[in-house]
Amino acid sequence: MNEKQFKALKSLLSQPKNIVIIGHKNPDGDAIGATLGLSLFLKNRGHHTQVICPNDFPNFLKWMPDCDSIITYDSQKEQSIEKIEEAHIIFTLDFNSLSRIGLLKDPLEKVTAPFVMIDHHQEPDDYATFIYSDTGMSSTCQMVYHFIELFDGISEITPKIATNLYTGIMTDTGSFRFPSTTAITHRVIADLIDKGAENTTIHQNIYDTNNPNRIKLLGIALKNLTVLPEYHTAYITLSKEELQENNFKKGDTEGFVNYGLSLTGIKFAAIFIESIKENIVKISFRSKGDFSVNDFSKNHFYGGGHLNAAGGRSDKPLKQTVSNFISILSHYKKDLDNAL
């Protein structure tokens, strides 16, 4: 955000406003943490805020401070539209294209309120009046921390805000192990702990809440793990039947793709999940070094994200999607051989 944009936004926020804060479809810890953290900060400054997500979020995030205030468009459509129409300002967090919010895109395209984008994904669209975009940042939650810093609000970070921001940074950095985790990230985390984020409790709430069905599903995922050593690649498949047999709930497959990437010699990992509700295959990609899964997903699977973490989808059946993926890999053999 340049100085001119910052001054204009600061002026807009100098008086109480009706503010809607939007997260992306299938929100993760970063999206929930960022939207709630920003909402609480702005609310404490006298604004009227409402967080809206396109759909529900996983149960392992439903302990987060103030999460019961979130409304979801797919189940609370009229209330969502009312809040959007009343908004003076609309913040969009952890996404940079309105295609990432599903049917929520329709009411947003009809309003005249200015948009503020806070996001760390590559190649942002130009729908927002105010754009704070930094692809080198670890997470949108870290960006919200720096946004609060720009508004001289660090001293106003409460334990609830700190907890939400810490959670988003922790989950989006893979517990601080991804390359986007910098010294500044650790300084931000240290300050959030000083301000009341209980790191041990947060970690337990996110990672130590497994149920028997999820563990069984992980077993099936690992059984389905396939390694392609000639391409330094591993992939996992989960069919619609396998999900249903294990009472799949939103968020149950979180982190499964990382098991493939943890194998010695593997630089590229993918998981293909046949959607129960949608006639698509959802895909998550992870990589090591300088092999860009953002480019790979964007070029072949209608997706994108970051250098080392991206999502995509396929309209083809599961087996055909996997066959297509393997055929595409042959064109990337040299890149994967040389990836650092």
Image (tube, rainbow, N blue to C red):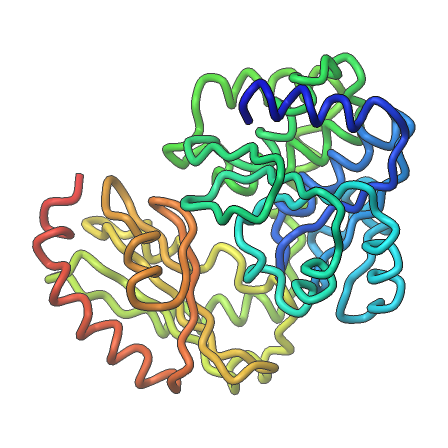
User: Where is the C terminus found, in terms of image quarters?
Assistant: top left
Name the quadrant containing residue 170. Answer: top right
Q: Is residue 57 left or right of residue 287?
A: right
Name the quadrant containing residue 313. Answer: bottom left
Name the quadrant containing residue 191. Answer: top right
Q: Is residue 140 above or below residue 85?
A: above
Residue 58 visible, this orientation: no
Q: Is residue 248 above or below residue 39?
A: below
x 55%, y 62%: residue: 99
x 80%, y 27%: residue: 13
Residue 183 visible, this orientation: yes
Residue 123, x across and y down, in percent: 41, 46
Which is nearer the eye, 262 or 161? 161
Q: Is residue 175 left or right of residue 285?
A: right
Residue 147, x across and y down, in percent: 64, 25
Residue 186, x across and y down, in percent: 52, 20
User: Where is the N terminus found, in terms of image quarters?
Assistant: top right
x 57%, y 49%: residue: 127
Which is nearer the eye, 216 or 255? 255
Q: Is residue 29 above or below residue 38?
A: below
Q: Is residue 39 left or right of residue 78?
A: left
Which is nearer the eye, 282 or 230? 282
Residue 93, x across and y down, in percent: 63, 44
